[in-house]
Image (cartoon, grey):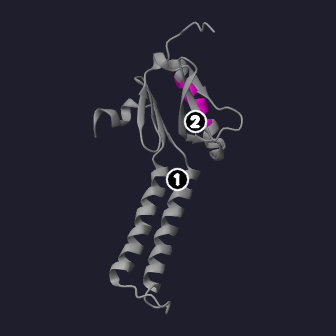
Amino acid sequence: MTRDESPSEWDMEVKSRKSARYAIAAAVLLVVAHSTVAVLLRVSPTGVYFRTADQLAMAGIGVLLAGLALLLTRPRIRVGPAGVAVRNVFSERMIEWDLVRGLSFPDGAMWARVDIPDDEFINVMAIQSNDREHAVAAVRKFRALEREYAPARVDQD
């Protein structure tokens, strides 16, 4: 484990529950469907000659698509004394507490966002509205940790 992944460094770590389940189910379905089609390619008389390479390619496409679907299991947010680490599908960003202006969940939004200076924000795909109580608990825990770690500031809006 690296220093960044030490469990003692983070007071909170949250991942979406429902999105991860949906992504895993979709990945399994993609692999099963493509593998089934690959096996049946040679069985059905379509007039086209499919070879073993075609079957392997079809199964490979299923595995590739499943891997892409599993990327949706990556989003997470970790909160600790050093700041907030937000990892979405492709990237991770560490935000120090002096830049954090809060966590908001706008009406109709699919996921929360960490507000930063200059009216900017970073989407937090790990806290999603479809997780309901899990999302509410995560927002409450984040705000409690923010009160503990974020420096007191006077907002000049």
Q: Nearer the viewer, mark 1 or mark 2?
A: 1
Where, by quadrant of the figure, is residue 91 drawn? top left
**Badge 2 local density, few (<14 within 10 Å), some, or many (20+)?**
many
Q: Is residue 148 left or right of residue 110?
A: left
Check if residue 144 falls in the magenta segment.
yes
- Which residue lies at the image location 48% right of the left edge and 18% below the top edge? 99
Name the residue tied to disc 2: 138
Quadrant of the rendering where the C terminus is positioned: top right
Amino acid identity at mark 1: Ala
Determine the main secondary structure of the stretch shown in magenta. Answer: helix
Q: Is residue 105 left or right of residue 55?
A: right
Where, by quadrant of the figure, is residue 4 drawn? top left
Q: Is residue 87 above or below residue 30?
A: above
Q: Residue furthest left?
A: 2
Asked if one can make out residue 138 in the rendered structure from this viewpoint, the answer is yes
Q: Is residue 53 above or below residue 67?
A: below
Range covered by the magenta-colored residues:
137-145
Q: Secondary structure at mark 2?
A: helix
Name the residue tied to disc 1: 20
Amino acid identity at mark 2: Ala
Q: Residue furthest right?
A: 107
